[in-house]
């Protein structure tokens, strides 16, 4: 009988759930640095340069 290890599965599920709510490595249109962009936001502020911009849905 095969034995399955689940230690990595829980971490993978957590990672996939977090990716479903953000666009990973979005590039700021002002400074060009990358950050995670939340999908449910109407506007966002770049954590690097402080520029705030609206998100078109």
Image (cartoon, helix red, strand yellow):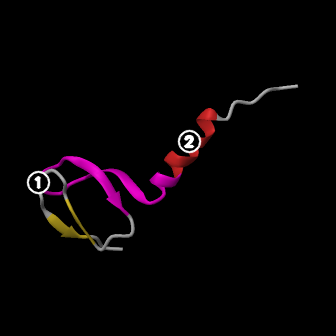
The N terminus is located in which quarter? top right
Secondary-structure class at tag 2: helix
Which span of residues is magenta-colored? 17-38
Residue 35 coordinates in the image, percent (x, y): 27, 50
The C terminus is located in which quarter? bottom left
Residue holding disc 1: 49
Q: Is residue 19 left or right of residue 29?
A: right
Residue 9 coordinates in the image, percent (x, y): 62, 39
Vertical arrangement, residue 25 with respect to residue 8, above or below: below
CB atoms of marks 1 and 2 within 8 Å? no
Residue holding disc 2: 12
Q: Is residue 40 left or right of residue 26?
A: right
Which one is earlier in the sequence, the residue at label 1 or at label 2?
A: 2
Residue 43 coordinates in the image, percent (x, y): 25, 71
> What residue is drawn where x is 33% and y is 70%?
41
- In the rendered structure, does residue 18 fall within the stretch colored magenta? yes
Residue 39 coordinates in the image, percent (x, y): 39, 65
């Amino acid at each position: 009988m095969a034995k399955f290890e689940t230690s990595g599965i829980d971490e993978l599920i957590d990672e996939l759930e977090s990716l479903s709510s953000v666009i990973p490595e979005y590039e700021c249109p002002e400074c060009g640095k990358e950050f995670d962009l939340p999908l449910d936001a109407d506007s966002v502020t770049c954590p690097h340069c402080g520029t705030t911009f609206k998100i078109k849905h």
